[in-house]
Image: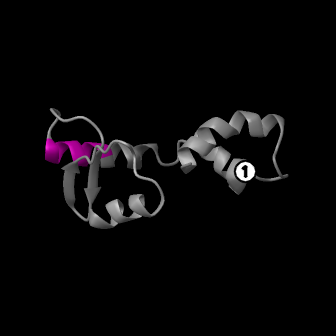
Amino acid sequence: MGVATVCGRGIESSKRRLERPGTLPAGLPLSLAAAATSTEFDQLIKTSHHEAFDEVGLDVGTPVLRIAGTTLFGPVVTPAPRGEAAGQLWDGL
């Protein structure tokens, strides 16, 4: 389960009942919960989003990846790879 999924599902339940004091589900530090409401990186994320879509255009969907100055649409993979297969896909990008 990814960090975003764990945080999204776990923040509220973690506020009510921690699996272990100071942690979110999957053993993630409770300090990650603050990121859910932080605006610290909003402008950086918006700028990155606009840079990527300026290169590929607005007629594509998501995901759009920008890696080392190269922007591409995708990959859209079904079913989503897990474990080592996911790592191999990422390595291939």
Number of dots carrying numbers: 1
> Is any atom of residue 37 visible in this view?
no
- Along the viewing direction, whichever of 65 and 53 lies nearer the viewer: 65
Label 1 CA crowd tier, 10 Å (few <14, some 14–19, many 20+): many
Where residue 88 appears, x then y in whole percent? 35, 65
- In the displayed structure, does residue 70 sit left or right of residue 1? left
> Picture quarter containing residue 62?
top left
| Residue at (72% x, 33% y) in the render | 12
- In the displayed structure, does residue 57 sit left or right of residue 1? left
- Could you tell me what secondary structure mostly forms the magenta stretch? helix
- In the displayed structure, does residue 26 sit left or right of residue 57? right
Instruction: Give the residues in magenta.
Output: 49-56
Q: Which quadrant of the figure contains the C terminus?
A: bottom left
- Along the viewing direction, whichever of 89 and 4 lies nearer the viewer: 89
Give yes or no for residue 83 being in the magenta stretch: no
Q: How is the image coloured?
A: one colour
**Which residue type carries mark 1?**
Leu
> Is any atom of residue 57 visible in this view?
yes
Where residue 17 appears, x then y in whole percent? 83, 38
Where residue 78 appears, x then y in whole percent? 33, 42
Vertical side of 41 occupied by 85: above or below: below
- In the displayed structure, does residue 32 sit left or right of residue 42? right
| Residue at (76% x, 40% y) in the render | 14
| Residue at (71% x, 47% y) in the render | 25
Pointer 1 residue: 30
Give yes or no for residue 51 being in the magenta stretch: yes
